[in-house]
Image (cartoon, helix red, strand yellow):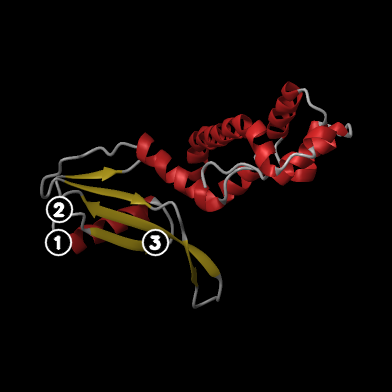
Amino acid sequence: MANKTISMSKIRQIIKLYSQRMGKKRIGTRLSISKNTVKLYIDAYHRLQRPWDELSLLTDFELNKLFNPVKEVISTNKLQDVFDFFPAMEKQLRKRGMTIAIQYRKFLEEHPDTYKESRFYFYYRQYCKRSKSSMHIEHTPGDKAYIDFAGVNLPYVDTDTGEIKQAEIFVAILGWSQFAYVEAMLSQSNEEFITACENALLYFDGVPSALMLII
C-alpha cells in the first residue's frame, strides 16, 4: 500500500534503542531503516516529552495515534524520494545493459525502507505518463526511410572457426507504413552500411525521397 510506512513494532524499537543511547545511524542500520526516518520518529518522541518507560506500556493503537502525523510525513517523503530519483534513472537507462531492476537495487541501497519493487515500477509508469508527451509526426507515402544500427549486438557462431562473434544489427523503417527491414552485419564500416542500405531498398522494392540517419 502507498501509505504503508513501518510497523509499530519498529517504532517501539527505535524509541527503545534511542533511550538506551544508541545513535540514529546505528539504529537505522540495525532495523534496515533510513537515518532520516529514524530522525523523524526521534524528533516526535522528543516533542511528546514522555519517557520510554511510560510509552512502552501503551497499546499499538494508542502509540499509533501519537505517531500518526509522523507516519504521514514519512509516506509523503518516501514518494517524493522515488520521484526525485526518476530523472537521473532515466539517463542511466539509456546506457546499454542498464535495467529498471538494477536501478531499483541502487535506490534500495540508499533508501532501505522504500516501496517494494512492484510499487516502484508502478510509480515509474506514472512518472513516464506525466513527463513524456508523444510528438505526432506526419508522414507521406514514399517520403522518408529512417536508418541506423541498433544499440544492441547479437552473438553468432562462426561455423568455420567456432568462434563466438558479435553481429551489428542494421534497421531501416519506412516512415508512413512502418514497414521495416533488419539485417545482421559484420561491422558498422562504410562498406557494410552502404551494402545494408542497398539491400533495404531492394527489399522495399523502391526508393524513398530521402534516407534519414537517426542520431
Residue hosting label 1: 205
- Is 97 situated left or right of 26 in this image? left
Residue hosting label 3: 185
Give me the C-alpha separation between circle 3 and circle 2: 21 Å
Between discs 3 and 1, the one toward the N terminus = 3
* Amino acid residing under circle 1: Asp
Secondary structure category for the residue under label 1:
loop
Decide which of 186, 107 is in the foreground and name it: 107
Decide which of 66, 184 is in the foreground and name it: 66
Residue 52's x, y, as percent?
82, 33
Q: Name the residue furthest left.
A: 141
- Is 33 situated left or right of 91 in this image? right
* Amino acid residing under circle 2: Val
The image quadrant where one finds the C terminus is: top left
Q: Is residue 107 visible?
A: yes
Secondary structure category for the residue under label 2:
loop
Secondary structure category for the residue under label 3:
strand
Residue 33's x, y, as percent?
71, 41
Residue beneath the point at 54% across and 69% down: 164
Between discs 3 and 2, the one toward the N terminus = 3
Residue hosting label 2: 207
